[in-house]
Image (cartoon, rainbow, N blue to C red):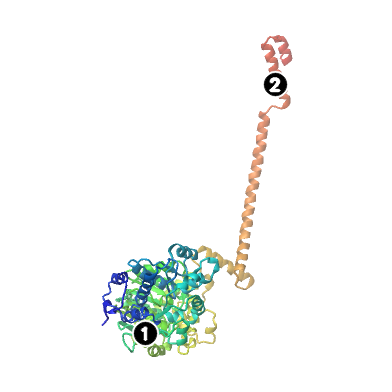
């Protein structure tokens, strides 16, 4: 039975209590009940608790109380750094920052800042200077940049000297090799005299890693809902063994059969997300599809917000969303294939069945991968039950032909499909348990067919393999597949020209550019010729007009002699008028006699 907040029996500031009440949670979760007193008791903590068990509040509440207590003696100056929370992804940092914002509606006197990649660094610096940074919620790369890059003229290394608490959220991810140099670099700037808390659903046990993180005689907390299980009790776990060329058919039959409302579909690579998010909407319309991966720039934040607020949807994503993301309405997590690490398996499925909600997860496996189930059950104490493959042969073959038709109609899909397949195979070799999950045992030819490929890509993994499961399309010229985009199609034709002329595909952009500029120069020459011709015609016309004008003028303009003659006549007329000369003299002078 979860304890009531009042049973915490430790002192909390009134505004911290008020902030906790604003969340309207009647009781604490076990990890909150265990961690809050320890962090407030000046202990370093390594807390492991199942996904969705409230670890965010478990570190934000003591963080805020610690800062309030220090502030009692002497108020925090706005630009003193008091606490730092590091998250492995910008989405998770953003999520933690929005939970913090809810607390700070009730807790005054503390400044805060969100520092994540993808935002403009200058805006971050302006934000820190203008609004202060008592509490920093960040991703490792951005914090390291602001600490180390002197150009920013931001004396953050000085500001962090007052740090009281460092939290590493998803700590095992932050302390693994991927972030090692960045985290080590950051830790070098932080005072050793501080509290440190590590939080994750899959904590590292290696003591030297904990010590590297600056923990001194840490208290380790392990909170599971069931001793023999590291995932929420409410989470039901399944796996389906798919036909070698039928993974897509299994996926769609499953999603339709289960009437899935709001689901995450984890893909191994960004290219797989790109490809499947391009084709799935044409094959599956029970719910709208969304797509997020780590290489996307601006759209990530909006797509996640749209998915969170959507009544139903399928979010196709990479492991950028595997950890921490809290969307209580997610009712299913689907894994296209085994994740790179066993820990990632626990985090992915932990996106559902969060804190009292029901939820289920399913992973799609080839027969050659079934040993993975036994491994994950032992290694991560996760129970997984087999369910029958709902896909029929008809569904498999109809989807394969639909995919091929789509690729034939749009070269962009043809490219994406090939890139997705190649990236999937390449990522496979990076599995943590590569002894179990071997590329050589994959049904590569059938997999290529299930991606709707029209031809097998040239890749070493396919060498000397039995490719009979790949249905070859006879007398089909791949070069006839066109891009829908005119510009890209023109580029492709240029490449084709280079290939025809040189027998080699232009690898370097320069070659295409040269060809392009050559073509353009030809077009330019033709254009220039036309322009010159037009100019010449214009000139000729102008000359013609000019000469006509001159003629006309000539005809209309008196010559000099005529002018002199005229002036003489005018003078005579004037003399006649003044009776200076007689009319006979006038006639004589004018030659009128
Ligand atoms: N005391 C509580 N009672 C009920 N729900 C809570 C409580 N504390 C937090 N929650 C809710 O539980 C959900 C999961 O919380 P949180 O995201 O912090 O879990 P987590 O342990 O960090 O999960 P993960 O390991 O996936 O990061 C959130 O929606 C949060 O609002």
Which percent across, then down, holds residue 113?
42, 67
CA–CA distance between discs 1 and 2? 121 Å
Mark found first going from the N terminus, 1 or 2: 1
Which percent across, then down, holds residue 121?
49, 66
Q: Secondary structure at mark 2?
A: helix
Counting every numbered tag in the picture gives 2
Q: Ligand 1, what quadrant?
A: bottom left
501 or 352, which lies in front? 352
Judge whether 127 appears above or below 189 on screen: above
470 or 59, which lies in front? 59
Q: What residue would you read off at disc 2?
A: 566
Q: Secondary structure at mark 1?
A: strand
Query: Dot 2, how many residues are within 10 Å of its Cα: few (below 14), some (14-19), or many (20+)?
Result: few
Query: Dot 1, how many residues are within 10 Å of its Cα: few (below 14), some (14-19), or many (20+)?
Result: some
- The quadrant of the image that shows the C terminus is top right
Judge whether 283 appears above or below 385 on screen: above
474 or 361, which lies in front? 361
Could you tell whether 584 is left or right of 520 in the image?
A: right
Q: What residue would you read off at disc 1?
A: 221
Residue 288 seen by the camera: no
Which percent across, then down, holds residue 330?
33, 75
């Amino acid at each position: 039975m979860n304890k009531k907040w009042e049973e915490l029996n430790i002192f909390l500031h009134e505004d911290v209590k008020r902030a906790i009440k604003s969340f309207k949670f009647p009781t604490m979760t076990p990890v909150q009940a265990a961690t809050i007193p320890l962090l407030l008791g000046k202990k370093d903590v390594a807390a492991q608790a199942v996904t969705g068990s409230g670890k965010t509040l478990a570190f934000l509440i003591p963080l805020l109380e610690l800062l309030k207590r220090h502030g009692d003696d002497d108020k925090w100056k706005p630009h003193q750094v008091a606490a730092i929370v590091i998250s492995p992804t910008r989405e998770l940092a953003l999520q933690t920052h929005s939970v913090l914002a809810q607390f700070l509606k009730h807790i005054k006197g503390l400044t805060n800042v969100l520092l994540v990649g993808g935002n403009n660094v200058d805006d971050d610096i302006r934000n820190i200077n203008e609004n202060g940074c008592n509490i920093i919620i960040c991703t490792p790369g951005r914090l390291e940049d602001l600490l180390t890059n002197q150009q920013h003229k931001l004396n953050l290394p000085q500001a962090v000297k007052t740090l009281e608490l460092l939290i590493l959220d998803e700590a095992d991810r932050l302390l693994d090799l991927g972030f090692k140099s960045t985290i080590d670099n950051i830790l070098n700037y932080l005072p050793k005299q501080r509290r440190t808390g590590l939080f994750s659903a899959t904590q590292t046990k290696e003591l030297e890693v904990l010590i590297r993180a600056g923990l001194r005689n840490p208290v380790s907390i392990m909170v599971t809902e069931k001793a023999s299980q590291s995932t929420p009790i409410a989470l039901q776990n399944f796996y389906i063994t798919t036909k070698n060329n039928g993974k897509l058919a299994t996926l769609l039959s499953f999603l339709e059969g289960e009437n899935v409302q709001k689901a995450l579909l984890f893909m191994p690579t960004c290219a797989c997300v790109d490809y499947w998010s391009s084709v799935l909407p044409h094959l599956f319309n029970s719910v709208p599809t969304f797509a997020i991966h780590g290489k996307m720039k601006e759209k990530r934040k909006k797509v996640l917000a749209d998915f969170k607020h959507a009544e139903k949807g399928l979010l196709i994503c990479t492991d950028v969303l595997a950890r921490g993301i809290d969307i209580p309405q997610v009712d299913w997590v689907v894994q296209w294939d085994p994740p790179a690490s066993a820990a990632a398996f626990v985090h992915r499925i932990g996106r559902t069945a969060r804190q009292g909600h029901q939820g289920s997860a399913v992973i799609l496996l080839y027969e050659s991968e079934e040993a993975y189930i036994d491994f994950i059950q032992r290694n991560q104490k996760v129970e997984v039950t087999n369910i029958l493959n709902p896909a029929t042969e008809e569904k498999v073959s109809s989807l394969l032909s639909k995919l091929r038709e789509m690729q034939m109609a749009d070269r962009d899909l043809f490219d994406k499909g090939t890139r997705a397949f190649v990236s999937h195979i390449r990522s496979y070799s990076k599995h943590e348990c590569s002894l179990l999950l071997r590329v050589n045992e994959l049904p590569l030819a059938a997999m290529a067919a299930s991606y709707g490929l029209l031809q097998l890509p040239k890749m070493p993994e396919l060498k000397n393999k039995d490719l009979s499961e790949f249905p070859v399309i006879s007398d089909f010229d791949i070069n006839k597949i066109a891009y829908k985009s005119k510009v890209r199609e023109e580029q492709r034709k240029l490449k084709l020209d280079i290939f025809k002329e040189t027998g080699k595909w232009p690898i370097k952009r320069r070659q295409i550019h040269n060809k392009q500029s050559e073509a353009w120069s030809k077009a330019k020459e033709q254009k220039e010729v036309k322009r010159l011709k037009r100019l010449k015609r214009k000139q000729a016309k102008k000359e013609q007009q000019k000469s006509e004008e001159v003629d006309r003028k000539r005809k209309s303009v008196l010559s000099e002699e005529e002018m002199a003659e005229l002036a003489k006549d005018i003078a005579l007329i004037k003399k006649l008028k003044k009776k200076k000369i007689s009319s006979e003299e006038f006639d004589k002078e004018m030659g009128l006699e």
